[in-house]
Amino acid sequence: MTIRVCVYGSSSPKTPKIYEEYAFKLGELIADKKLICVNGAGKFGVMGNVSKGCKSKNGYVIGVMHELFSVDGIHESPLVDEFVLSKGNDLNERKQLLIDHSDCFIALPGGTGTFEEFWEIVSEKTLNFKGLSNKPICLLNINGFYDGFILQLQRAFDDSLLYHKIDEYFYVANTPEEALEWCIDTYYSNDSNKNNKLNTSRVHR
């Protein structure tokens, strides 16, 4: 089975260059390891650059987007090999489709949409909802961008508001290499995934 790596992050064209560089590198690594990249199909920011990095190494990208944004041929982007369109008057179906099409998650810097996506899967996983039980979640903390998240979670733990230790919610990585390796190792360490041997011959091309 080829692992599908979901990448959350900004779609803004004003995204700082360092975040784009990390995203591009992560995309390259996903392709190099013959995994599948899944994201929100944005053309700019973290989304666009993780796709660019993946495609630069002949990788395969699945883009999950709301039909509202599928206009003017955007669903025919050269950065995306396969589009999955969601419907409805909110983003709930899109978020679920991202989960359904992924085996692990890596969050890079982003805005409120990224924050919501990240905390939703963290919360749902603790309750064993939405099929997330055996799907690793990683926070790529570039230049301390997510220090506030970690600090707030630590405060909640210190005040006895959490049911688990902080490192049981998600893993914090500092480099794309560390993030991806942790996701792969953790995915295959789960008993239910041990039979899903990495088969590079099945990766999409």
Image (cartoon, rainbow, N blue to C red):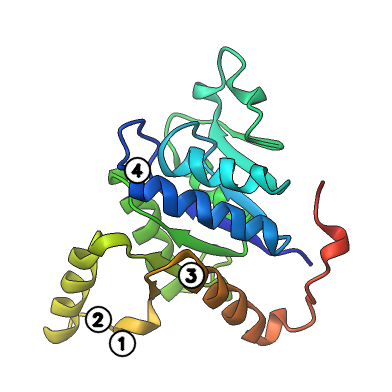
Marks 2, 1: nearer the viewer: 1
Q: Characterize the local packing of mark 3: few (<14), some (14-19) or many (20 or more) Cα atoms within 10 angstroms.
A: many
Q: Position of residue 60 (x, y in %)?
A: 71, 47
Q: Position of residue 183 (x, y in %)?
A: 55, 73
**Separation of disc 2 and disc 4 at Cα?**
35 Å
Q: Characterize the local packing of mark 1: few (<14), some (14-19) or many (20 or more) Cα atoms within 10 angstroms.
A: few
**Separation of disc 1 and disc 3 at Cα?**
20 Å
Measuring 48% from the left and 42% from the top, which residue is drawn there? Answer: 47
Number of the label disc, if any, that sits on residue 165:
1
Tell me the kind of residue under disc 3. Answer: Ala
Q: Quadrant of residue 152?
A: bottom left
Say whether residue 94 is visible.
yes
Marks 3, 2: nearer the viewer: 3
Measuring 52% from the left and 72% from the top, which residue is drawn there? Answer: 136
Q: Tag 4, which secondary structure?
A: helix
The reply to whether dot 2 and dot 4 touch (C-beta < 8 Å) is no
Name the image quarter holding the N terminus.
Answer: bottom right
38 relative position to 95: left or right: right
Measuring 34% from the left and 60% from the top, which residue is drawn there? Answer: 119
Marks 4, 1: nearer the viewer: 4
**Mark 3 lies on residue:** 179
Tell me the kind of residue under disc 2. Answer: Leu
Work out which residue is located at the far right of the displayed protein and give it. 201
The reply to whether dot 4 and dot 1 touch (C-beta < 8 Å) is no
Marks 2, 4: nearer the viewer: 4
